[in-house]
């Protein structure tokens, strides 16, 4: 019998695990001042909307969920929280039921799904019958954190806090194009709710959501607590996930390491957020200097993520 999940933030979408709303968290009205590579920022401003994703094809079909308008065009000085019912996160969607598709599209209003999995990973899943679902009115976007590198190549890096920080740094070093694509969707389509997922909705998704919440102005402690909710969202699948990891040769049957890999402890993300500040100056610094967004675009993303509604979590 599945354990009941707290709602909010979790949402029951049949056969999609770890599905939750990334909104509702309190924001600070003071944003960090990143170090900007000026030679990049001027160039990137001229490219502000030319590299748009294919997500424009479904925008005319967007059905605005009343909750989704709460944050649009808010002055950042009046914002109180991250918008609810706009950015969602989950594990992979290949087992979603028809009822799950209906909930995702009609009740949650999701119009775009960003899949962070690698090409070899997706192909392997398809060979095992886990195909990418087709959902009418919802666009699928391939946005890999690692384009060609199978995620099991990262397995040895997961060794307590330091290992997770190292692995998450590698995600940041490869995921810039996909992070930019997602942020440009938020900038240009504030009425088009999105779902971000990888395999378990833990590591790659966790890093991207941490960036989004940090940009919105959420405190590091809260960002890390949101990340740690994955321990709750995946607890009914822990044995299955550990079993799959033990099949990987690189682990050599090490159950302790396999069990550690499926954890999502708060301190793991705190270490990553500290690393982002040390290496990039801030989440904003990463987005501007590594992903190529300009200051005005970044401020637009922040504005579209924020709401005047009081924090719910």
Image (cartoon, rainbow, N blue to C red):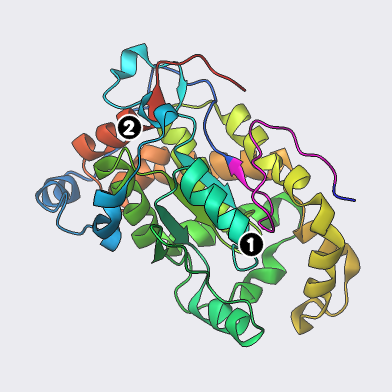
Q: Earlier in the sequence, mark 2 or mark 1?
A: 1
- Residue displayed at 68% across by 65% down: 157
- Residue displayed at 63% across by 43% down: 269
Q: Nearer the viewer, mark 2 or mark 1?
A: 1
The residue labelled by disc 1 is 97
Tell me if mark 1 has few (under 14), some (14-19) or many (20+) residues whose alpha carbon lies within 10 angstroms of its own.
Answer: some
- Magenta: main secondary structure: loop
Location of residue 250 with respect to 65 vertically, above or below: below
Nearest to the observer: residue 69 or residue 268: 69
Q: Are marks 2 and 1 in contact (CB under 8 Å)?
A: no
Q: In the displayed structure, does residue 237 sit left or right of residue 55?
A: right
The answer to if 189 sits in the magenta stretch is no
Residue 164, image x, y percentages: 66, 55
Can you tell which mark lies on residue 304?
A: 2
- Residue displayed at 47% across by 41% down: 87
Q: Is residue 307 visible?
A: yes
Residue 33, image x, y percentages: 33, 28
Start-end of magenta stretch: 3-20
The answer to if 16 sits in the magenta stretch is yes
């Amino acid at each position: 019998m599945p354990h009941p999940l707290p709602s909010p933030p979790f949402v029951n979408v049949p056969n999609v695990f770890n599905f939750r709303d990334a909104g509702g968290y309190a924001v600070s009205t003071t944003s960090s001042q990143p170090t900007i590579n000026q030679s990049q920022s001027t160039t990137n401003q001229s490219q502000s909307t030319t590299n748009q994703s294919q997500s424009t094809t479904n925008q005319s079909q967007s059905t605005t969920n009343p909750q989704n308008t709460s944050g649009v065009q808010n002055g950042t000085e009046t914002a109180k929280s991250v918008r609810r019912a706009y950015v969602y996160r989950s594990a992979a969607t290949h087992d979603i039921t028809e009822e799950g598709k209906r909930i995702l599209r009609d009740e949650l209003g999701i119009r775009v799904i960003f899949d962070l999995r690698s090409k070899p990973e997706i192909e392997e899943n398809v060979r095992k019958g886990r195909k990418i679902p087709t959902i009418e009115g919802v666009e699928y976007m391939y946005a890999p954190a690692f384009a060609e590198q199978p995620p099991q190549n990262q397995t040895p890096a997961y060794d307590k806090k330091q290992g997770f920080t190292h692995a998450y740094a590698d995600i940041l070093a490869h995921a810039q194009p996909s992070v930019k694509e997602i942020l440009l969707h938020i900038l240009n389509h504030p009425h088009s709710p999105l779902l971000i997922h990888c395999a378990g909705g833990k590591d790659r998704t966790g890093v991207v959501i941490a960036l989004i919440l940090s940009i919105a102005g959420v405190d590091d402690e809260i960002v890390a607590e949101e990340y740690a909710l994955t321990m709750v969202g995946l607890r009914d699948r822990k044995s299955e996930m550990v079993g799959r990891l033990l099949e990987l040769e690189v682990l050599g049957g090490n159950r302790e390491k396999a069990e550690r890999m499926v954890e999502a402890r708060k301190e793991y993300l705190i270490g990553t957020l500290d690393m982002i500040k040390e290496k990039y100056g801030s989440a904003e610094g990463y987005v501007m200097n590594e992903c190529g967004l300009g200051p005005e675009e970044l401020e637009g993303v922040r504005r579209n993520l924020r709401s005047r509604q009081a924090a719910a979590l």
